[in-house]
Image (cartoon, helix red, strand yellow):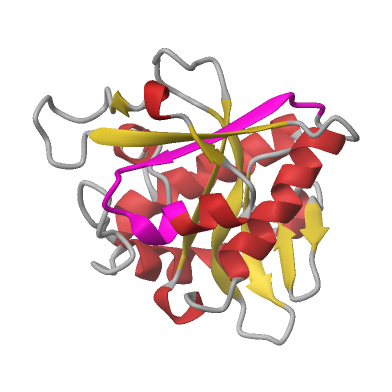
Amino acid sequence: MPWTGRTALVCRSFAGPGSGPVPNRAATQNIHLETDRLVLRSWELADLEPFADMNADPAVMEFYPSTLDREESYAPAQWIQQSLDDQGFGFYAVEAKDGGGFIGYVGLSSVQFDAAFTPAIEIAWRLAKPAWGKGYASEAAKACLDHGFNVQGFTEIVSFTTPANQRSIAVMERIGMSRDAGGDFEHPNLPAGHELAPHALYRKIRPSSS
């Protein structure tokens, strides 16, 4: 569940649900990836409520600056789908093939702040708590890495989180990312001295066979 800082910056920059948060999938590119158990797809209107529920869950948002209320969740969903439409990659809505609808998001994005390692493409995820412990984050993230390297042609993908977020660090290691301790940094979108500001940086280089 790496934190990019984008939610804090973007969620108040739109009018909210009245501005037409997420178009129906029929009105967007039907972008998707698939794994054995998951579908990674464009966002739908029906995703907004479970997305907001996830963002309001203190357990999910433990390593973010705060939970989000419903209105604060709508604008990031707009931005996410627009990025998918414009770039052909982004944060996909994730659902399990065995049913249940939206369980979170996983995907790739350009890092939106300045640091020693930027410009860079990051991989990030956020899943609802009922989806934890099933290997879904790693499964979806591996598909996104493959897409990033073999379809988008990225040569390196990074990820980062506060060192206390051991669940996300375990995912980074399971998908083959390596710690770059020399690249650890203070997140510029958090106040100096904030307990979540120190971030560990992980990297994965495009495999030579890709």
Quadrant in which residue 14 is drawn: top left
Q: x, y percentage for residue 130? A: 45, 81
Question: Which residue lies at the image location 45% right of the left edge and 64% below the top edge?
Answer: 51
Most foreground residue, 46 or 67 = 67
Question: Which residue lies at the image location 49% right of the left edge and 63% below the top edge?
Answer: 48
Q: Is residue 172 visible?
A: yes
Residue found farthest to the right: 209
Q: Is residue 82 above or below residue 141?
A: above
Tally the marks: 0
Q: Is residue 20 visible?
A: no
Q: Is residue 143 above or below residue 135?
A: above
Quadrant in which residue 36 is drawn: bottom right
Quadrant in which residue 99 is drawn: bottom right
Residue 10 sits inside the magenta stretch: no
Q: Is residue 163 above or below residue 97?
A: above
Question: Which residue lies at the image location 48% right of the left edge and 17% below the top edge?
Answer: 117
Could you tell me which quadrant the C terminus lies in? Answer: top right
Q: x, y percentage for residue 37? A: 74, 76
Q: x, y percentage for residue 46? A: 57, 70
Q: Is residue 49 above or below residue 1?
A: below
Q: Which residues are magenta?
A: 153-169
Residue 17 left/right relative to 92: left
Q: x, y percentage for residue 76? A: 45, 44
